[in-house]
Amino acid sequence: MGKSELKSYQYDRVESEYECFEINGSEYRVRMFDAFTGVSVAKTAWKNLLGGTLPEGTTLSDLFMALSLKVLTEEELEKLMHCSMKVCEKRLKSGWTEVVDKSGHFQVPEIEHDSAAAFLITKHAVVFGTSSFFTALSSALK
């Protein structure tokens, strides 16, 4: 299995709740988490932030990588991965297809056995899905 690479870009469409990115030349998009899942994911992913702020120069992406590999338990990381896969779609010739359906079944079979791609999808979904949460929380606390 080759190294999965992430190329991210804004999806210039009316559907602003989506953001697209590429992994190994394949196009994916994630949508925002629903409110309940978003708060749960934010709490799970970022529970170790002191005071809800990031050290200067640290991005959510950098922090996710550190937390997921050093701090989160396997159960917490698995929870994040399940939530993330359910909000991700892959562009196929037939159109956009859910990576994982609501029941938790893979609809894009190659992802089921590509742990690097699954991790990159999770990273992208968590960062995209929680960034607005922290922006809103930061503004409300000022």
Image (cartoon, rainbow, N blue to C red):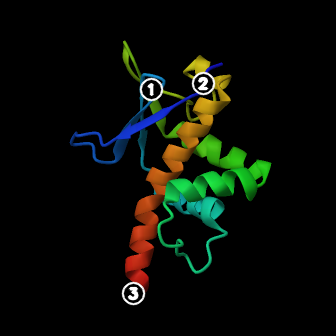
Q: How many marks?
A: 3
Element type at marker 2? Answer: helix
The residue most toward the top is 93
What's the mark number on residue 111?
Answer: 2
Tell me: residue 107, above or below residue 100. Answer: above
At label 3, counting other C-alpha atoms closer than 10 Å, the crowd grade (few under 14, some 14-19, many 20 or more) is: few
Query: Could you tell me residue 8's position as x and y percent?
Result: 39, 39
* Mark number displayed over residue 31: none
Which mark is drawn over residue 90? 1
Image location of residue 75, percent across then percent down: 77, 49
Crowd class of label 1 (few under 14; some 14 to 19; many from 20; radius 10 Å): many
Toward the right, the furthest residue is 74
Callout 3: SS? loop
Among numbered discs 1 and 3, the one appearing first in the sequence: 1
* Camera sees residue 129: yes
Residue at horizontal 61 percent and vertical 21 percent from the top? 2
Residue 36 x %, y %: 53, 59
Which amino acid type is marked by label 1?
A: Lys
Residue 137 at x, y percent in the picture = 44, 75
Kindly identify the residue that appears in the image at 35 percent across and 43 percent down: 18
Cβ–Cβ under 8 Å for marks 2 and 1: yes
Report crowding for label 2: few under 14, some 14 to 19, many 20 or more residues within 10 A (C-alpha): some
Mark 2 and mark 1 lie on one chain; the one further toward the N terminus is: 1
- Position of 100 with respect to 77 (left or right) is left
Residue that badge 3 annotates: 142
- Amino acid type at circle 3 is Lys
- The amino acid at mark 2 is Ile
Residue 3, placed above or below residue 20: above
